[in-house]
């Protein structure tokens, strides 16, 4: 066709004569075009000078048209493609741009250029494309590299030869191992979800969903079926204190005048000591009174005012042979090792009968001092080392090795120098361990909890893990599987927990009586389902600052928690007067209700409920210190203790001798209401 620009049309149905005429006309038209067109176009779009639009930027027309109009001219103007597509119609088209089309495209380019705040050109878009391509290539290479690392890590982990420090930074090595463990052990989640339909929690959840779907709850509160009506109950202003309380208060105010506590029962000593600690009047004089003679129990919540010299003088000559309980909390200034070796740990068995030791807040207690105490108390069964900031993993390992067969309770709250995975092998040896508290230790992870409950879960009765931020539903799943005797658990401030946690607890731990779930993202339906499935034995429940707690939880509490003594619903602002009224009037055993931050409540509830014994805390500006220990009376050395009944008096005043069939009673701390003589199992 030559190097001329023309529009040539050929029709196979035309005769040769007409074809010849068309060729002559085409030749004439071609000659005219050659006079106006450039000498050699080579079938390529003409390069147009657009300097008047984009000064200093030589621009190719086809590329600019593609940028501004979204049209790929190289594909649309391909003569070969057009010929191939039109072969079915036996027509052939071959064309290039005419001057009119060029002018039209130039106008479009000018208009587009006027709309732009800044001139754009081909180089700009090319740089953007290069940057995007580079970023995609780097991300692809990073993903491939991480995939290879994960494969190698998983292979070594399965063989038990993994070292996370080879693959991860020091700060994230333990997190990586825990995360991989979670993935490996939780690979059956789908099957686990399918098996929950017939469980107590699954049936309770289904009932709640059905009830909600039928809209039994009205928009303004509880439905008509569960309507609460406030009652006009005449209440006395203040209850008169008992004579015992008046006497204790008088003694606390004049404690400096007390000269002896001989023949005073331990219960009254504890009560007087607590009053002095609350009023910040505990001093060396009263500590001397408690340590005089041959005491069996010394309980002090605050020893911060006792100096090293006073402590050495008091316990340097104290008879500790009969001492079974020693509580010296906040004794940080008088617990260095050189003081202990002259006082409490002056010999290898200077505390032969000691069962419970509490040194909460002993910030000067070191590993060396702890080793001295361990050698001095061979019968130790419970130890509280919370907030002992100098203790390390080595000290805890040595402690666990000393009491493998006797230790039942271990409290390590806020001991930040203790690495959970480092002390795990030693803790797994504590086969009698019943209470483990590790609140606020950042290294506590799912892997730690799983291995711990698999080794010691059959005897576990209380687990305390608030502020252990790495815990997820995976660890609670194994708690439910291995801790069937669990009576108390604290899961406060764990943001990674979901509704599965309530399912695992409801189906696996059927004996829980104390549950704390403060500041979690659990749903109203899940909490209600747990209460309906396993909430009949609850005596203490904390739902502090769980925003989704609402009417379902209120209804479940009113139906299933008749033994509840203490309830914390602070900052649960979805509960209205009717919901709280239904809870308080239905839970007849309720003695303490915390409602801090519940500004939505009115006098309709506060003055309309009919429960005379409940004490509502947080709605009035009043001192709350007197309520803090109402439900925590001092009792036996251990929180959970096994007793053997020596004899039982039946209702018919007959003595039943169970010597042939021994009866074991698993009872909590409060034993004041027992009327039968009991002796410890060991004695």
Image (cartoon, rainbow, N blue to C red):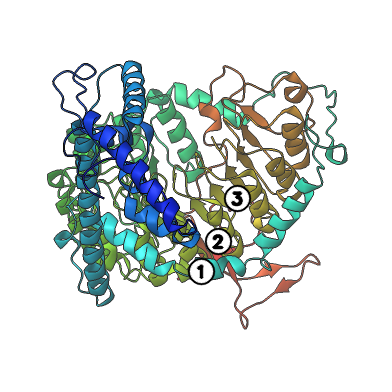
Query: Counting residues from the N terminus, which is met first, the one under dot 3 or under dot 1?
Result: 1
- Count numbered badges in the picture: 3
The residue that disc 2 covers is: 504
x and y percentages locating residue 442 in the rendered image? 30, 47
Per the model, the C-alpha gap separating discs 2 and 3 is: 34 Å
The residue indicated by pointer 1 is 481
Considering only order in the chain, which callout, 3 or 2, is on the residue closer to the N terminus?
A: 2
Q: Nearer the viewer, mark 3 or mark 1?
A: 1
Label disc, if present, on residue 672 of the rendered structure: 3
Which quadrant of the structure image shows residue 5?
top left
Q: Nearer the viewer, residue 76 or 596?
A: 76
- Can you give x and y, in whole percent of width and height, for residue 498 in the image? 52, 50
Q: Is 511 in front, or is 674? A: 511
Q: CA distance from mark 3 to mark 1?
A: 33 Å
Mark 2 / mark 1, whichever is N-terminal: 1
Q: Secondary structure at mark 2?
A: helix
Residue placed at 69% from the left, 49% from the top?
563
Q: Residue at x 70, y 48 (%)?
A: 561
């Amino acid at each position: 066709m030559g190097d001329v620009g023309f529009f040539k049309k050929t029709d196979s149905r035309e005769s040769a004569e007409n074809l010849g005429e068309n060729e002559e006309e085409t030749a004439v038209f071609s000659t005219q075009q050659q006079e106006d067109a450039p000498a050699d176009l080579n079938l390529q779009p003409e390069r147009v000078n657009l300097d008047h639009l984009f000064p200093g930027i030589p621009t190719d027309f086809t590329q600019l048209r593609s940028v501004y109009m979204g049209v790929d001219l190289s594909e649309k103007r391909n003569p070969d493609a057009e010929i191939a597509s039109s072969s079915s119609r036996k027509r052939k088209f071959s064309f290039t741009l005419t001057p009119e089309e060029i002018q039209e495209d130039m106008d479009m380019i000018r208009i587009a250029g006027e709309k732009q705040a800044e001139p754009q050109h081909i180089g700009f878009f090319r740089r953007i494309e290069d940057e995007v391509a580079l970023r995609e290539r780097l991300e692809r290479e990073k993903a491939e590299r991480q995939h290879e690392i994960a494969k190698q890590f998983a292979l070594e982990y399965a063989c038990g030869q993994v070292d996370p420090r080879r693959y991860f930074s020091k700060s994230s090595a333990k997190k990586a191992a825990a995360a991989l463990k979670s993935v490996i052990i939780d690979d059956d989640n789908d099957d686990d979800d399918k098996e929950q339909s017939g469980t107590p929690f699954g049936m309770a959840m289904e009932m709640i969903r059905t009830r909600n779907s039928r809209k039994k709850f009205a928009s303004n509160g509880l439905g008509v079926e569960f309507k609460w009506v406030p009652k006009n109950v005449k209440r006395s202003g203040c209850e008169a204190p008992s004579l015992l309380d008046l006497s204790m208060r008088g003694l606390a105010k004049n404690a400096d005048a007390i000269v002896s506590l001989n023949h005073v029962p331990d219960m009254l000593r504890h009560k007087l000591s607590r009053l002095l600690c609350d009023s910040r009047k505990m001093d060396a004089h009263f500590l001397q009174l408690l340590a005089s003679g041959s005491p069996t129990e010394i309980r002090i919540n605050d020893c911060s005012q006792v100096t090293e010299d006073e402590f050495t003088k008091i316990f340097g000559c104290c008879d500790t042979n009969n001492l079974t309980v020693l509580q010296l909390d906040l004794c940080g200034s008088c617990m260095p090792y050189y003081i202990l070796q002259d006082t409490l740990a002056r010999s290898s068995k200077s505390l032969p009968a000691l069962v419970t030791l509490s040194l909460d807040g002993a910030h000067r207690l070191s590993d060396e001092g702890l080793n001295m105490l361990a050698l001095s108390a061979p019968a130790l069964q419970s130890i509280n080392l919370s907030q002992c900031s100098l203790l390390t993993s080595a000290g805890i390992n040595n402690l666990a090795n000393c009491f493998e067969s006797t230790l039942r309770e271990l409290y390590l709250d806020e001991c930040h120098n203790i690495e959970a995975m480092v002390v795990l092998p030693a803790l797994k040896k504590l086969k009698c361990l019943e209470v483990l508290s590790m609140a606020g230790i950042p290294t506590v992870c799912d892997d730690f909890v799983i291995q711990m409950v698999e080794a010691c879960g059959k005897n576990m009765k209380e687990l305390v893990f608030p502020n252990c931020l790495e815990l997820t539903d995976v660890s609670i799943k194994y708690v439910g599987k291995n801790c069937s005797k669990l009576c108390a658990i604290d899961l406060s401030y764990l943001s990674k927990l979901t509704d599965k946690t309530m399912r695992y607890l409801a189906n696996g731990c059927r004996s829980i009586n104390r549950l704390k779930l403060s500041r979690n993202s659990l749903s109203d339906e899940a909490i209600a389902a747990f209460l309906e499935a396993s909430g009949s034995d609850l005596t203490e429940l904390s739902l502090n600052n769980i925003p989704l707690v609402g009417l379902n939880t209120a209804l479940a509490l009113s139906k299933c928690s008749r033994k509840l003594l203490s309830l914390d619903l602070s900052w649960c602002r979805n509960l209205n007067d009717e919901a709280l009224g239904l809870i308080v009037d239905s839970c007849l055993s309720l003695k303490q209700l915390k409602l801090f931050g519940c500004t939505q409540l009115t006098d309709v509830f506060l003055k309309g409920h009919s429960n005379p014994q409940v004490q509502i805390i947080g709605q009035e500006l009043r001192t709350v210190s007197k309520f803090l220990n109402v439900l925590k009376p001092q009792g036996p050395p251990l929180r959970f203790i096994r007793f053997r009944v020596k004899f039982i008096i039946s209702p018919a005043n007959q003595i039943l001798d169970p010597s042939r069939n021994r009866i074991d009673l698993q009872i909590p701390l409060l034993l004041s209401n027992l009327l039968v003589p009991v002796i410890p199992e060991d004695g």
